Image: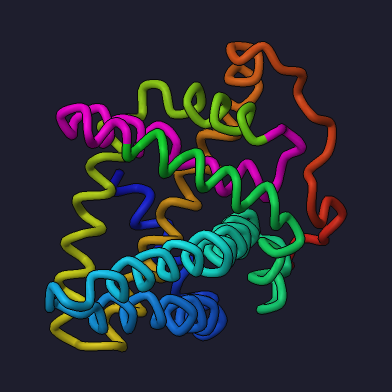
C-alpha cells in the first residue's frame, strides 16, 4: 500500500500540472452534482421537485461525470506506464461511451445491493470491482467480462485496496485544510496511487484472471496501443 503512494508521489511531481488540470476539470464537471444536491427543496410541498432533482443528478452522474472519470483513470495509467499523454486523453471515456456508462451502472447496482445487504458485502464488492474503469478503457472485454476480470485480478488484494481507500479518505480530509488546492492535490495523488496498483496487478495477475474468468487474453489494448513511451 505505502509503495503505491510512494510511487504515485514521484509520478505526481513529474507530471504535476497536467495531472492537476485533468483532475481540476473533473472537479468542475462534478460541480453540478454538488449544486443539485445543495439545491434540493426540503419542504414537503416540493416533493416532486425533489424527485426531479434526484433523477437529473443520477442521469448527469452516469451520462457525464462517471464517463469523464474513466478517461481520468486512463490518463493516470498512461502516466504510470511512462507513455506520452495529453489532456485530450481524459476525454477518451466518451469514445468508449456505452461501455463506460453501462459498466458503471452495473458496478453501482452491485455495490448498492451489497450495501443494502448489511454494508460489508457492498464494501467488499466495491474493492473487488475497482479495476473496472482501467479494463474498460484498455481491454476488449465485454462489460460483464470486465467485472469478472476485475474481481479475479483483485483476489488477495482486498485489504490493500481497503487500506488505500481509508488512506485516500484521510488525504481528502487533510486536503480540506487547504481548500480547493489541497483537495485537487489529494485527488491527483489518490488517482496516481490506484493507477500504480492496477498496473502492478495487471502485470502479475491479468492473464491468470482471464483464465479464471474463462476468457481469452486479448492481444491488444483498445486505445493507443502504439503510443510511444516517454524518454
**Residue 8 sits in which quadrant?**
bottom left
* Residue 30 is inside the magenta segment: no
Q: Residue furthest front?
A: 45
In the image: residue 157, left or right of residue 202? left
* Residue 133 is inside the magenta segment: yes
Return the residue nearer the eye: 130 or 81: 130
Q: How is the image coloured?
A: rainbow
In the image: residue 40, left or right of residue 75? left
Q: How many marks?
A: 0
> Is 139 above or below relative to 83?
above
Return the residue nearer the eye: 120 or 191: 120
Q: Which residues are magenta?
A: 113-142
Residue plotted at (50% across, 52% down): 195
Q: Position of residue 99 (x, y in %)?
A: 68, 47
Residue plotted at (36% across, 61% down): 190
Q: Position of residue 85 (x, y in %)?
A: 70, 70
Q: Which is the main secondary structure of the residues drawn in magenta?
A: helix
Q: Position of residue 151 (x, y in %)?
A: 47, 26
Could you tell me which quadrant the C terminus lies in?
bottom right
**Residue 136 sits in which quadrant?**
top right
Residue plotted at (19% across, 87% down): 178
**Residue 129 sits in which quadrant?**
top left
Could you tell me which quadrant the N terminus lies in?
top left
In the image: residue 65, left or right of residue 35? right
Q: Residue furthest right?
A: 226
Return the residue nearer the eye: 97 or 194: 97
> Is 132 above or below relative to 17?
above
Q: Position of residue 158 (x, y in %)?
A: 31, 30
Residue plotted at (35% across, 31% down): 125
In the image: residue 145, left or right of residue 20? right
> Is 228 above or below relative to 119?
below
Amino acid at each position: 500500500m505505502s509503495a503505491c503512494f510512494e510511487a504515485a508521489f514521484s509520478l505526481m511531481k513529474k507530471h504535476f500540472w497536467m495531472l492537476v488540470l485533468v483532475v481540476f476539470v473533473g472537479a468542475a464537471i462534478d460541480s453540478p452534482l454538488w449544486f443539485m444536491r445543495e439545491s434540493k427543496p426540503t419542504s414537503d410541498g416540493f416533493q416532486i421537485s425533489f424527485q426531479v432533482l434526484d433523477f437529473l443528478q443520477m442521469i448527469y452522474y452516469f451520462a457525464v461525470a462517471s464517463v469523464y472519470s474513466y478517461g481520468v483513470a486512463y490518463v493516470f495509467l498512461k502516466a504510470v506506464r511512462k507513455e506520452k499523454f495529453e489532456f485530450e486523453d481524459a476525454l477518451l471515456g466518451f469514445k468508449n461511451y456505452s461501455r463506460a456508462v453501462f459498466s458503471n451502472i452495473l458496478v453501482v447496482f452491485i455495490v448498492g445491493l451489497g450495501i443494502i445487504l448489511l454494508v460489508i458485502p457492498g464494501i467488499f464488492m466495491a474493492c473487488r470491482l475497482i479495476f473496472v474503469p482501467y479494463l474498460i478503457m484498455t481491454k476488449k472485454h465485454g462489460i460483464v467480462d470486465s467485472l469478472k476480470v476485475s474481481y479475479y485480478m483483485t483476489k488477495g488484494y482486498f485489504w490493500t485496496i481497503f487500506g488505500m481507500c481509508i488512506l485516500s479518505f484521510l488525504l481528502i480530509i487533510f486536503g480540506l485544510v487547504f481548500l480547493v488546492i489541497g483537495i485537487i492535490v489529494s485527488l491527483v495523488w489518490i488517482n496516481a496511487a490506484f493507477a500504480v496498483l492496477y498496473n502492478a496487478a495487471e502485470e502479475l495477475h491479468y492473464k491468470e484472471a482471464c483464465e479464471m474468468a474463462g476468457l481469452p487474453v486479448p492481444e491488444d489494448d483498445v486505445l493507443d496501443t502504439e503510443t510511444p513511451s516517454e524518454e
